[in-house]
Each structure stands twice: as structure tokens, then as C-alpha cells.
Amino acid sequence: DAGVIQSPRHEVTEMGQEVTLRCKPISGHDYLFWYRQTMMRGLELLIYFNNNVPIDDSGMPEDRFSAKMPNASFSTLKIQPSEPRDSAVYFCASSTMTGIMAYEQYFGPGTRLTVT
Amino acid sequence: EDKVVQSPLSLVVHEGDTVTLNCSYEVTNFRSLLWYKQEKKAPTFLFMLTSSGIEKKSGRLSSILDKKELFSILNITATQTGDSAVYLCAVGGGSSNTGKLIFGQGTTLQVKP
């Protein structure tokens, strides 16, 4: 398996522009997570999906952020309009959970976003 | 509120030293505790612990969980410069009782030659 795939790997954009980050989870995984990581705040969970349905979006910072998962093999995280404080590394991770156990999440390589 | 706290936040040692990283948690519906290593890229999985007192070992790394005292330790013996990384502790469970992981803030380890 190729692992979790994210694109683009780097994104530089100007303030006010729309940014779309993409993720392909590991085949067969039914959980998908979007995280944001900064030096100041560490790793923050933004939103996660189970079987393509958003379960918890309480970590989404504000209405400028939205995420979708139209099918089991694809998810997007959109920021519109982008602001300099959105600059961070955005990780996508996927996992599967059997029974009551929480299984390890596998992380994608991340997208480094810079908003100028 | 569910939380995971790691200590120390940062650590500098010399090659050959042994280090112990700590992770304490307060999480409802605890299911498992996981350790990740993060170098200059994505976190990579190290261990998952679900039962108290059973040590997991991989080479020079080992970890153990104490579900009574609500903590875990990650030991690294004979450290090497390649062990320099951020080590993240995460707990599965929480009030939503799904596949969500609650991450600690990480311990930054620097191993000097």
C-alpha cells in the first residue's frame, strides 16, 4: 500500500486566496483525520470522518475552514479566504478500528502551507 | 476535559545515555495509549499499549503502561543521534469513544554526539 497520500506537499499563497488540500487515505481504513501542526500549538485535530461522515468538527478554527469526504478514498480541506495565521503543516491520517480498540493512525507526509 | 500531558517538554542528552519520557493522561473511556516519533516530517507509529504492566520492546526502545496511575513511559537506551526527534504520546478513547486520538504536546529529544 502507498500509505496516506496528500497533495500538494507545499503550498504558498497570498492572503485572501482559496486553498484546497487533498488526502487519499489507506484503502480499507474507515477513519480519516485532519490535523494542523504549528510550533506554538503542537498537533491539533481539526475534524475527523468515519465512513465518510464528519463525526467531530469542533477543532475547525472558524467558518473559513471546511472539509469534505465525498467517498472512501478522497477528502479535501478547504480554507477560504486564507490568512497568514493559517500557515502550518496540515496532516491527514487514517485508521481503522475493530471492536472497542483504537488502532494506530497512519499519517500522510503533510502539506506545508505558507500564507503571505 | 480529556487531556494528555508529556514531560519533559524538551531534553538534551549525549550519545549513549538512557532517557525516560513520561506521559500522563486523564481520558474517559480509555482504550489504548500510543507513542509516535516525529522527525522533520509526519509522525511514525512506535507502540500501542492497552494492558498494564506489559512491556513493549523494539530494539533500544521500550514502553510500559500503568492504567492504575494513568501514565506511560518510553525508554530509550544507548541513545544515538538518530533518536533526535519529537516523541508524541496519544490516547485513544475520550467521551466520544471512537477512533479519535488525544495527543500530548510532545517531548523534543536532542541527542548530541
Image (cartoon, coloured by chain):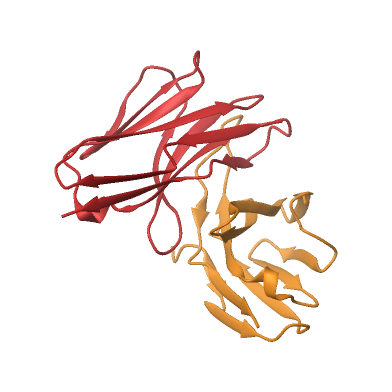
Which quarter of the rendering shows the C terminus of chain A? bottom right
x and y percent of residue B34 in the render? Answer: 46, 37
Front residue of B77/A75: it is: B77
Q: x, y percentage for residue A93?
A: 56, 56
Left or right for B21, reference B93: left
Q: How many marks?
A: 0
Image height of A103 relative to A28, above or below: above
For residue A21, which quarter of the picture?
bottom right
The picture places residue B108, in percent across and down from the top left corner, at 39, 49
Going 43% across and 18% down the picture, which residue do you hit?
Answer: B52
Q: Quadrant of residue A16?
A: bottom right
Q: Quadrant of the N terminus of chain A?
A: bottom left
Identify the residue at horizontal 59%, vertical 67% (top origin): A88
At 78% from the left and 49% from the top, the residue drawn is A58
Q: Is residue A29 visible?
A: no
Viewed as shown, does residue B57 lie left or right of A58? left
Asked if residue A6 shows in the view, the reply is: yes
Drawn colour of chain A?
orange
Which residue is more in the foreground, B14 or A95?
A: B14
A95 with respect to B111 (left or right):
right
Name the one closer to the observer, B37 or A29.
Answer: B37
- Chain B, chosen colour in render: red
Relative to B80, say whether A75 is above or below.
Answer: below
- Residue at 76 percent across and 57 percent down: it is A60
The residue furthest top is B68
Above or below residue A89? Residue B113 is above
Q: Position of residue B57 (x, y in %)?
A: 27, 33
